[in-house]
Amino acid sequence: MGCAPGVARQRGGGGCGLGLGIGRRRGRVFDNGDLRLLIMALLAEKPRHGYEIIKALEQCVGQGYSPSPGVIYPTLTLLEELGHASVTEERAGRRLYALTEAGAADLEPNRPAVEAILSRLAAGPAHRGIPPQVLRAMEALAGSVRARVQARPLDAAGIEAVAAAIDAAARAIEDL
């Protein structure tokens, strides 16, 4: 399963730029309407089962994201009710979803929105706009903290020392 046509794979995450709004709101990956448009773009690529859509989104968004069936299937039902997707029942209760002509007609004027959605993720979820040198330093700090904490348990003084060092770095950055 691939990403939507013309979408480059993300650096480092193994996914492609299908990921809609990651980092814009804590706890939310998709803004209103983004998931619907993305699923329509995937269905325009080829008919898919719900599980295939979940896997395609998981692969494309990357960074450990896996969309919940409780989000995907209601969106597919909505697309079906709107006449934007058709469903073919297959053996063992599997359903194959395809984009209808009405869905394609709705998707076409929204292609710029789909491209904007894809572009927002291209740089990685929470790292857009951060210079690579700063990202490297942030990752080094996180790795050092993780390594130190996991190497051996910290006592109360050690925990305070690690927290104080991080707080001092934060204050120094704020004062720049």
Image: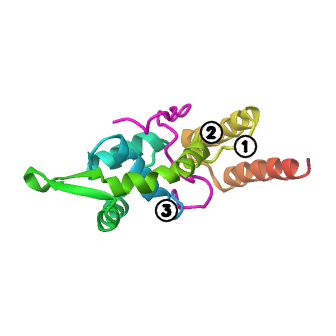
Residue type indicated by callout 2: Ala
Q: Position of residue 49 (x, y in %)?
A: 24, 49
Is residue 24 in the magenta section?
Answer: yes
Instruction: Look at 51% across and 58% down and name the residue there.
Output: 30
Q: Are marks 2 and 3 in contact (CB under 8 Å)?
A: no
Of the two numbered discs 1 and 3 on the same chain, state the one appearing first in sequence: 3
Could you say which disc has been placed on residue 123 in the image? 2
**Front tag of 1 and 3:** 3
Residue that carries the numbered disc 3 in the rendered image: 33
Instruction: Look at 70% across and 37% down and name the residue there.
Output: 135
The residue stretch that appears in magenta: 1-29
Instruction: Look at 33% across and 53% down and name the residue there.
Output: 101
Of the two numbered discs 2 and 3 on the same chain, state the one appearing first in sequence: 3
Q: Position of residue 72 (x, y in %)?
A: 35, 59
Q: CA distance from mark 2 to mark 3?
A: 21 Å
Could you say which disc has been placed on residue 26 in the image? none
Q: Is residue 152 left or right of residue 139?
A: left
Q: Is residue 56 left or right of residue 152?
A: left
Compared to 165, does 33 lie above or below? below
Q: Residues within 10 Å of mark 2 (few under 14, many from 20)?
A: some
Q: Is residue 79 left or right of residue 145?
A: left
Q: Position of residue 98 (x, y in %)?
A: 27, 50
Residue type indicated by callout 3: Gly
Q: Are marks 1 and 2 in contact (CB under 8 Å)?
A: yes
Extreme residue toward the right, this view: 176
Where disc 1 sits, the SS reads loop
Residue type indicated by callout 1: Gly
Residue that carries the numbered disc 1 in the rendered image: 129
Camera-side residue of 105 and 16: 105
**Front tag of 2 and 3:** 3
User: In which quadrant will I find the N terminus?
Assistant: top left
